[in-house]
Image: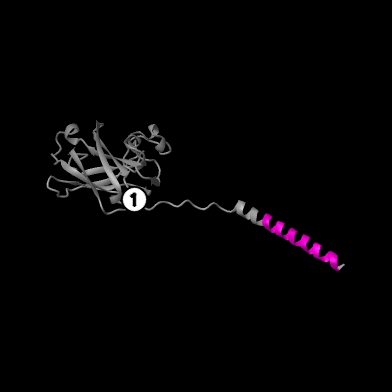
Amino acid sequence: MVRRAIPLLLVGGLLLLTLGAAILGSVSETASPVARAVPARCQAGQLALNFTDTGNGGGSVIWVGTFVNRSIRSCSLKGFPSLYMVGDYGNPMPTTPRDMTGLRPSPETSPKEIDLGPQASASFVVEVSDGAQSLPSLPACPPAASLTVMPPGDSVGIQVGTAGFIAYPYDKGGPCGVVYVGALIAGPALCALCPACCPAAKKQSASRFRHRGEPT
């Protein structure tokens, strides 16, 4: 009897080990996946900025800004850039930036998190009134020599030349300097102008033109 006890103990031990491994395997298969880490926010020092005038249309002038990650590390962007106009001598000009909602290049829903790898880009639309052409009775507004643009969440700006950038009033008696800013969309300038044309922004569909606070 003593000679048979040892093999029986070994068999029992092996059974317990097999059962334990099966339980652990089941737990590992049903465990929730670990959330993907989001890169740190992009800072102005990591980014280059290009700015392009795309022309007039419907009483507005549309510009497109494009951030490019010039660093060797990935970073993230989400939301609306902030900006202000700068005069010929580097003096800040009165600027009233407003978030743009539902404009052609702007997402219908809340802005999406954008992972910006090295040399990757994210773009946004800036719209100003061409009031001098559509409403000649409006007062003249001074042009901005440049814009200073801050990435979302950053207080440091990137200055970019904008010859011919003028923010006329949107209506009679309104102020100069009203600037509508769209949410960032992954990809180059084309993505901001036409999200449906850009694979990186297909999920951020376009809608008809409207500003924040206007009825749909």
Looking at the rendering, the stretch of residues picked out in magenta corresponds to 2-22
Quadrant hosting residue 200: top left
Spot occupied by residue 196 in the image (x, y as percentages of width and height): 39, 33
Q: Is residue 68 visible?
A: yes
Please give the name of the residue rendered at 19% of the width and 41% of the height, measured from the top-left corner: 161
The quadrant of the image that shows the C terminus is: top left
Query: Quick check: 54 above or below 80?
Result: above
Left or right: where 212 falls relative to 171: right
Q: Is residue 168 visible?
A: no
How many numbered callouts? 1
Spot occupied by residue 111 in the image (x, y as percentages of width and height): 38, 45
Please give the name of the residue rendered at 71% of the width and 56% of the height, measured from the top-left corner: 18
Q: Secondary structure at mark 1?
A: loop
Residue 104 lies in the magenta stretch: no
Query: Quick check: 82 above or below 58?
Result: below
- Name the amino acid type tagged 1: Cys
The quadrant of the image that shows the N terminus is: bottom right
Question: Which residue is the site of mark 1?
Answer: 42
Report the front residue among 140 and 213.
140
Please give the name of the residue rendered at 15% of the width and 40% of the height, measured from the top-left corner: 143
Dominant SS in magenta: helix
Residue 6 lies in the magenta stretch: yes
